[in-house]
C-alpha cells in the first residue's frame, strides 16, 4: 500500500523558448542513467492510427519504456486506486475503480516536480514520478486511456540547489521539448482522432499551459479533439473578469460540467491561510511575480464550475491522520481515503490573487479528522494536495464531459 504523502513542489515561472519543428522525427535523444524498472509490456496493441497530424515518430517516445503510463502497458495507472470513504459518524465504505481498456477517449498527463535524481534534469526512466502519477492520475483510467510521458523534468535537487552546476536556462527548456515531442508522437501514432483530456500539476501544468498556448490553441484541428485541460497548481492567465484571452485566444475556462474544449485550473489555499503577499501561486506570473496589467490567474471550482461554493469529494493517500485517534487508521486497508462533506471550496479573489479557497467543515465531536494535511510554507498554500482535495470531484466532471463529447462525436 502506498501511504507516503509526497510533497509535490515545483517552479511555475518557465522561460519561453524555442521554435516549432516540422521534422517527422524527434531531434532530441535519450540520456537515461537510472536503472528503475520500466513498465511491463503486455500483448495488447493499439489500432492503426487515423491521425489529425502529419506522420511523426519520436526517437524517445517510440520506446514504451519512456512512458510512465500507456494503455498498451501494465503500469502504475492500472494499480488499485480504491478509496475508503470515512463518514462523519465514523462509519466507512469502500469505493472501487477499475481501469477501462476500452475507454472512449484518452488522457495525456504531465506530472509535477518529483524526481530525486541528483542532476538538474531527470532521466527518462520514471522513479518517484510513478508514485505521483498513481496518486493524481491513475484513477482517471476508469474513464480514459492514460498516456503519461516520462519527461526530463527539473528535479527537486535542481529546483532547490541554486549552486548546482549546469545551464539552468536549458534545464527549463528541456521539459517542454520532451512534452511537445511526446504530444506530437501521441497525436501521430496513438490518438486516432479520439477526444483527449489534458491533465497536469505544477511543473507539468507549466509545460501543458505552454503546449496549449503555442501548439493546440492556434490549431483548429488540435482544438477539435480537446475535451478539456485540467491543469492545477499553476496559472492560466485571463483578462480580469473574463474567461478567455491573455494566455489562450480560443480555449476558455470551463463554466459548466458539460462544457468541452475548455480549461479547469486552480491553485488551492485554506480559507484560514490565504495567499500572503509573496505567495508562489494565484497570479499569472507565478513564484511571487506581479501580474501583467489587466490580467489574473484563472480559477475554476470543479465543485461549482458555474460559480459559487461547492462540496469537494477528496481522495488522499491513506495516512494516520484520518481519525482523531490515529490508532483507528489501521482499519483502512485501501490506498486512499476520502471524507464526504468535509471540504467545501469557492474561487476567491483578494489582494491581486485568485485561488481556490478550501474550507473545512470540522466537527470536533465526531471521530474523523477535522482537517487535512498537505500544507507546506504559507507561500505554497496547499499546493502539495491540489489534486487530492478534489480528485473524486474532478473524476465526476470528467465523466460528464465525456458523456457530452460522445453525444456530438
Image: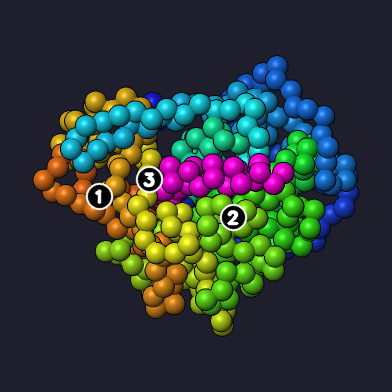
| Extreme residue toward the left, this view | 365
Q: Which residues are magenta?
A: 383-409
Q: Is residue 137 visible?
A: yes
Q: Nearer the viewer, mark 2 or mark 1?
A: 2
Q: Secondary structure at mark 1?
A: loop
User: In which quarter of the view is residue 1 placed?
Assistant: top left
Residue 49 appears at what percent x and percent y?
82, 34
User: In which quarter of the view is residue 251 placed?
Assistant: bottom right
Instruction: Tell me, for residue 371, which label it has, or none.
Output: 1
Instruction: Tell me, for residue 259, which label it has, or none.
Output: 2
**What's the residue at 62%, 53% (across, down)?**
260
**Label 1 – label 3 distance at C-alpha:** 14 Å
- Image quadrant occupied by the C terminus: top right
Q: Is residue 242 above or below residue 368?
A: below
Q: Is residue 154 visible?
A: no
Q: Is residue 361 magenta?
A: no
**What's the residue at 37%, 44% (across, down)?**
314
Q: Secondary structure at mark 2?
A: loop
Q: Provide the major secondary structure of the magenta segment.
A: helix
- Of the image marks 2 and 3, the number of the one nearer the N terminus: 2
| Extreme residue toward the bottom, this view | 293
Which residue is the site of mark 3?
Answer: 313
Of residue 228 and residue 327, the one placed in the foreground of this image is 228
Residue 162 appears at what percent x and percent y?
52, 59
Q: Nearer the viewer, mark 2 or mark 3?
A: 2
Q: Secondary structure at mark 3?
A: loop
Q: Is mark 2 in CB contact (under 8 Å) with mark 1?
A: no
Of residue 162 and residue 169, the one placed in the foreground of this image is 169
Horizontally, residue 364 falls left or right of residue 339, namely left
- Of the image marks 2 and 1, the number of the one nearer the N terminus: 2
**Label 2 – label 1 distance at C-alpha:** 32 Å
Amino acid at each position: 500500500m502506498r501511504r507516503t504523502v509526497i510533497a509535490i513542489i515545483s517552479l511555475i515561472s518557465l522561460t519561453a523558448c524555442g521554435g516549432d519543428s516540422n521534422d517527422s522525427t524527434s531531434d532530441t535523444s535519450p540520456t537515461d542513467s537510472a536503472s528503475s524498472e520500466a513498465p511491463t509490456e503486455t500483448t495488447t496493441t493499439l489500432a492503426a492510427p487515423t491521425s489529425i497530424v502529419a506522420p511523426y515518430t519520436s526517437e524517445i517516445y517510440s520506446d514504451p519504456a519512456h512512458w510512465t503510463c500507456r494503455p498498451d502497458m501494465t503500469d502504475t495507472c492500472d494499480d488499485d486506486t480504491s478509496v475508503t470513504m470515512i463518514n462523519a459518524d465514523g462509519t466507512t465504505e469502500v469505493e472501487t475503480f477499475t481501469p477501462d481498456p476500452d475507454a472512449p477517449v484518452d488522457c495525456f498527463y504531465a506530472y509535477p516536480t518529483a524526481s530525486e535524481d541528483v542532476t538538474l534534469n531527470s532521466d527518462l526512466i520514471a522513479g518517484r514520478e510513478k508514485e505521483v502519477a498513481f496518486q493524481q492520475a491513475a484513477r482517471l483510467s476508469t474513464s480514459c486511456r492514460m498516456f503519461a510521458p516520462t519527461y526530463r523534468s527539473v528535479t527537486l535537487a535542481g529546483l532547490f540547489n541554486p549552486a548546482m552546476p549546469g545551464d539552468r536556462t536549458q534545464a527549463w527548456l528541456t521539459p517542454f521539448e520532451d512534452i511537445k515531442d511526446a504530444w506530437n508522437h501521441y497525436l501521430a501514432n496513438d490518438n486516432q482522432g479520439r477526444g483527449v483530456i489534458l491533465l497536469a500539476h505544477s511543473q507539468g501544468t507549466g509545460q501543458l499551459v505552454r503546449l496549449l498556448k503555442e501548439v493546440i490553441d492556434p490549431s483548429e484541428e488540435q482544438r477539435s479533439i480537446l475535451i478539456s485541460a485540467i491543469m492545477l497548481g499553476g496559472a492560466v492567465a485571463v483578462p480580469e473578469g473574463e474567461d478567455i484571452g491573455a494566455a489562450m485566444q480560443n480555449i476558455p475556462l470551463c463554466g459548466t460540467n458539460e462544457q468541452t474544449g475548455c480549461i479547469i485550473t486552480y491553485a488551492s489555499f485554506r480559507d484560514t491561510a490565504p495567499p500572503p503577499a509573496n505567495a508562489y501561486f494565484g497570479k499569472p506570473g507565478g513564484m511571487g511575480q506581479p501580474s501583467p496589467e489587466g490580467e489574473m490567474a484563472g480559477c475554476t471550482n470543479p465543485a461549482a464550475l458555474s460559480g459559487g461554493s461547492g462540496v469537494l469529494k477528496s481522495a488522499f493517500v491513506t495516512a494516520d491522520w484520518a481519525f482523531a485517534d490515529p490508532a483507528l487508521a489501521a482499519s483502512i486497508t485501501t490506498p486512499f481515503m476520502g471524507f464526504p462533506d468535509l471540504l467545501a471550496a469557492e474561487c476567491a479573489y483578494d489582494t491581486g490573487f485568485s485561488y481556490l479557497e478550501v474550507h473545512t467543515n470540522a466537527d470536533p465531536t465526531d471521530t474523523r479528522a477535522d482537517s487535512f494535511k498537505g500544507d507546506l510554507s504559507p507561500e505554497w498554500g496547499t499546493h502539495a494536495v491540489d489534486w487530492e482535495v478534489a480528485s473524486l470531484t474532478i473524476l465526476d466532471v470528467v465523466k460528464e464531459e465525456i458523456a457530452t463529447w460522445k453525444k456530438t462525436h
